[in-house]
Amino acid sequence: MILSHSKQTIVLRVPKTGSTTLESAVRMTGCVQEGDTCSPVEDARLPTKSPNTAYLAFTQEMQDARRSMQEKQRYAQGSLEDLAYTDTEKTIRENGILNQTNRTYKRIGLNHSTLDDLTDTDSLGYLELITEEQINRYKTYAFIRNPLTRAISSFIFERRGHRSMPIVREQFHDLVLSDDMQGLVYRDQYHYHEYNGKRIVTPLLFEDFTSSVNSVVNHMGGTVLAELPRFKSGNDEILVDRPSVEDWIDPYPNVRDALLERYSEDLFLWESVSGKTLS
């Protein structure tokens, strides 16, 4: 996410819509000024940027705690000792369990937070990064992608992160039909296009990616890149035949209907922006 007070613009990062490239392009083309806040972009080695000391302390605490937890978990694989989590680590674990149970996304970090998270004191509102008045006044951008292609992309990304899980069509169908598409990677896109239940965000069409990114760069006064960077493309290395809607979804009406129902709000938004129809 980018909170640009200098340009009175907000750029949101919707999971699995190329938003890593979007934020990177904006930051690499001179759009960000002193006083603006940016979440880290690990793939591009772009660090956290903000004048807000509370936010910087929050991100550092989260980073340190997660690194410590990973080390303890690795050690525990060969040990019978209980994991001695600190109070901060316990809070992070409890928050993660609560989010998973309730299908919520509180205090997940700025990268993939929504406008509502910015003023919700149960999420990131206590950091006072931006006011409600500014959110309503600033120009905000977020991508919208065909929900069917995004569902497949999310599945591949999740399975690649858990190498013991197979990337096969039957597992994808089981996940969809069991209504078990949980976690940030499957989060509804329309969440990023609303604030207080009202749609106020300017949608960017994923299927017109380069023009969409360039429109944001132009709006923010940057220099358009001759070629956009590409991130998280390692899936191509592990997939001989990349899954497609035509092979994985269209021949299976029950799977297709379940996805269109699950992402009905995303479908409505995508169809209104793209001028195409899936249902």
Image (spheres, helix red, strand yellow):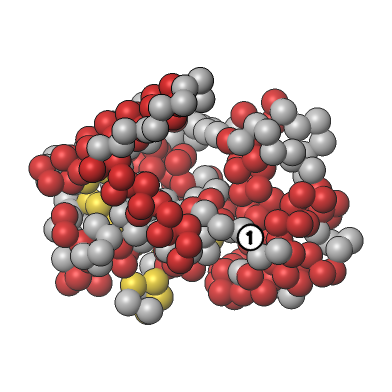
Location of residue 193 in the rendering, given as x and y in whole percent from the top left corner:
42, 67
Side (left or right) of 175 relative to 117: right
Location of residue 160 in the rendering, given as x and y in whole percent from the top left corner:
63, 35
Q: Nearer the viewer, residue 143 or 80?
A: 80
Side (left or right) of 204 relative to 91: right
- Give the residue drawn at x 12%, y 46%: 54
The extreme front residue here reads: 80
Q: Can residue 105 be spotted in the picture?
A: yes
**Quarter holding the C terminus?**
bottom right
- Give the residue drawn at x 39%, y 67%: 201
The total number of labels drawn is: 1
Look at the numbered disc 1 and give the secondary structure of its residue. loop
Side (left or right) of 253 relative to 220: right
Side (left or right) of 187 relative to 88: right
Location of residue 105 in the rendering, given as x and y in whole percent from the top left corner:
40, 59
- Give the residue drawn at x 32%, y 77%: 196
Q: Nearer the viewer, residue 227 or 167?
A: 167
Q: Specify the amino acid type for callout 1.
A: Asp
Q: Can residue 204 be spotted in the picture?
A: no
Q: Nearer the viewer, residue 99 or 28?
A: 99
Q: Eyeballing the image, is 168 above or below 63?
A: below
Q: Eyeballing the image, is 191 above or below 36?
A: below
Decide: few, some or many residues near mark 1? Use Cα within 10 Å; few <14, some 14-19, many ≥20. Answer: few
The extreme right residue here reads: 251
Q: Residue 202 falls in which quadrant of the image?
A: bottom left
- Give the residue drawn at x 40%, y 52%: 96
Location of residue 217 in the rendering, given as x and y in whole percent from the top left corner:
37, 46
Q: Which residue is mark 1?
A: 180
